Image (cartoon, coloured by chain):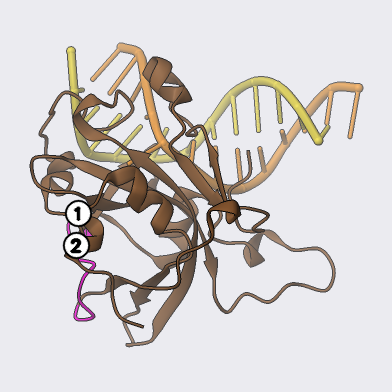
Chain colours: A brown, B yellow, C orange
Amino acid sequence: MPLLTQDFYSQDTKKVAKLLLGKILCRREAEGHVTKSRIVETEAYLGLKDPAAHTFGDRRTQRTKAMYLDGGHAYIYMIYGMYFCLNVVTRTTEHPEAVLLRAVEPLDFVMPRKKPSKTQLPANGPGKICRYLELTKNEDGLSLMTKKSVLWIENAEDLPSKEIVTAKRIGVDYAGDAANWPLRFYIRDNLHVSKK
DNA sequence: AGTGAGATGGCCT
DNA sequence: GGCCATCTCACTA
């Protein structure tokens, strides 16, 4: 499958967040093997005018530098001192916006016969994605638009809109009314979506 | 099944 | 010093 290009990532952030559902996140391991996962849950962060976004009010800091790159780069930051979260930067340098990846479905996943264990559902949360794919600050700012990178996203067929559920974002209660904005998207009935 | 605390560090005022 | 775009485990019942 072809990679998603600059044109794709430059679009409206909310649109990109929806379109990313079902697309294939690819991670090249140290040995050259490529781990592939399907994106099943995302959240849009609308930059300058979004109180929940790190770039709210145009705050340019060391941490948010990658958000000011063109669309199609990774923004990875540390949270709670021990986890990392992976975002896809959208739009252009004047619009520091991004899509948080909240959950992916490992493509070699096999439905267990009995009860699923925690280790069989390893990437159903933003911190768990980075733990699963071993992503850290080292990968912050990397391009997602070339296979020469260690991280990229391949295209896949767009999902029908009835398979997409829209909801409030998680963990942003501090952001006032913005906490209620419908900017979280996930694939209906997908087993790998993060739990409430 | 539901609640609560602790881990742990960088960023921001 | 306080607050996080989180996760896990221990505790109640």
Q: Find residue A99 and report its horizontal and vertical position in percent.
A: 33, 47
**What type is the residue that disc 2 sits on?**
Asp
Q: x, y (%) of residue C7?
A: 55, 47
Chain of the residue under label 2: A
Instruction: Identify the magenta region.
Output: A138-148
Residue A186: x and y in percent read 54, 50
Say what amino acid the circle numbered 1 marks.
Answer: Ser
- Asked if the residue at tag 1 contacts the one at tag 2, i.e. Cβ–Cβ closer than 8 Å, the answer is yes
Residue furthest bottom as drawn? A32
The correct choice, above or below, for A171 with respect to A124 in the image is above
Secondary structure of the residue carrying tag 1 is: loop
Q: On the rendered image, what quadrant is the N terminus of chain A found in? A: bottom left
For residue A10, the mark is 1
**Chain at tag 1:** A
Tell me if mark 2 has few (under 14), some (14-19) or many (20+) residues whose alpha carbon lies within 10 angstroms of its own.
few
Disc number for residue A7: 2
Look at the image and say whether residue A142 sits in the magenta stretch: yes
The residue positioned 51% from the left and 32% from the top of the image is A168
* A71 sits to left or right of A151: left
The answer to whether one can see residue A146 in this image is: yes
